[in-house]
Image (cartoon, rainbow, N blue to C red):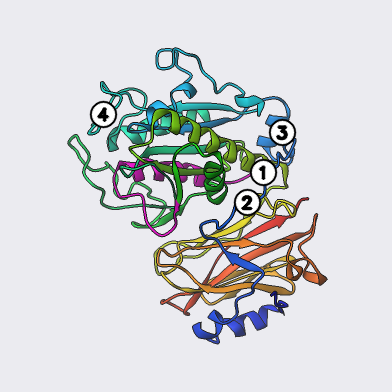
Amino acid sequence: MHMNRTPLSAVSLLALALTGQTALAQRQAPSVREIGPSASPQPSVRRAGAPSDATPRGRAMAAGQRPVVLLTGYWPPTNEMLRRFSPKPSLNPQGWIGSDWHGRGYDVMAFFPEFPNPNCGTCGTGFGDLTVDYQDTVPDFARISELLRPIAVITFSRGFPGTSWEVEMNQFNRSSWIDDYVVPRQPDTLPPDGSLPAGALRLSSLPANRIIDAVEAANVGVDPRICWAGDGGGFLSEFVAYLGVWYQARNADPLSPDWCVSAGHVHVGGAVSWTQGAAAAEVTLETVLDHVDEVLACPPVIQYCEGLTNSLGAGADLSVVGAPSISGNEMRLHVQRLPLSAATLTFYGPDRGMGTIGDGLLCVGGSLTRLVAINANSRGARRILLDLTAPTLGSGTTAVTVGSTWRFQTWYRDSIGAGSNTTNAIEITFCP
């Protein structure tokens, strides 16, 4: 059952914000559903066709310049399952299969450490283009990513002993990590990401639900799952995962020639065979490329305004994962770096605005329509999948329709200052 949403003026929004946490938590619109593990397979994925020429990436692709998808492995079985994507003949004597992979217009390149025993249990640092060491991984990953300027990044490492294929959603900017194998045993810089406070969260931007559904449907002998609430373990697996999502965040602007659409990490069970891992990796890659195709085919999502400093020491961030496609209907909003369990309210309107609300900036103007009021989780994040085909999102003066442009923002409670703050704002033009 869907409820009608109420258009809100800036004044009434502020009044609503001041009514308290309890009142906010009661105002949840059923036309927005919270992301969780898929209960049933998603609709089949559609190729989106030619990329839009609205971005430098799109124009380069239209001109025949192939972007690169970067894959990295760490411990077995991930290095062996990715070997055929290595462009180095010395590492891949059977030949590189990543050139214009499956005729999709992308080159796929993999980098991974080598070990004397390719089936090692306790493997150590290894050797080669990417080694398992904090000090080495930072320059290795920087060199590779800056050379390739990938449009998507998927990092892999060994996880639990079984056959899991686990998409990690949460990567943390830790000020302390589990010691590695060689002195010095901690990263040179703590936390590694100086642009955020220690402990700050960066979310995966992989199409997690679609990956899990596709891998499960492929029936390749692995156990697909999503780690929604946990973390990557605090060792080198999470460290390389953080480097991947951090790279994507630095290149998240669609107007940048180095736009990176998606990045995230997959933990692979130690009992997954090389053959099973290779098959699951290809399914994962296909799914990510479908996702990238769809994003590139739609007008770019524009971030503007900014989230001001909150009690965590950094502004909260609102972003989009997936294409703003009405027919695809799989776009979701990510809100991260919120105060833990804070009450939040997401809303949209037709115009850009500039005002203040609490300690934040109100950057959406016109008649404002609320989407969802719900608390952040214990990691300080919210993930919201918009049902773009729901009657409450597709009728009246606030209709989300093909070609319409709307601006979105999230308000949230905080423990300092005026008691509330806002994220940045995003501008979305919806496509077919």
Q: Which residues are magenta?
A: 226-255
| Local crowd size for mark 2, using a 10 Å CA cut-off: few (<14), some (14–19), many (≥20) | few
Magenta stretch holds residue 220: no
Name the side, left or right, on which 351 lies relative to 22. right
Q: Position of residue 138 (x, y in %)?
A: 35, 36
Q: Amino acid at mark 3?
A: Arg
Q: Position of residue 148 (x, y in %)?
A: 51, 28
Q: Amino acid at mark 2?
A: Gln
Q: Which residue is mark 2?
A: 42
Q: Is residue 259 visible?
A: no
- Sequence order check: which comes first, mark 4 or mark 1? 1
Specify the quadrant of the image occupied by residue 288: top right
Which numbered tag is attached to residue 59?
3
Name the side, left or right, on which 152 lies relative to 368. left
Which numbered tag is attached to residue 400?
none
Q: Residue at x 30, y 24 (%)?
A: 118
Magenta stretch holds residue 241: yes
User: Marks 4 and 1: CB-CB under 8 Å?
Assistant: no
Per the image, label 2 sits on a secondary structure element best described as: loop
Q: Position of residue 52 (x, y in %)?
A: 74, 40
Q: Amino acid at mark 1?
A: Val
- Sequence order check: which comes first, mark 3 or mark 1? 1
Q: Nearer the viewer, residue 29 or 56?
A: 29
Relative to 177, residue 314 above or below: below
Which numbered tag is attached to residue 120?
4
Q: Amino acid at mark 4?
A: Cys
| Local crowd size for mark 4, using a 10 Å CA cut-off: few (<14), some (14–19), many (≥20) | few
Q: Which residue is mark 1?
A: 45
Q: CA distance from mark 4 to mark 2?
A: 37 Å
Per the image, label 1 sits on a secondary structure element best described as: loop
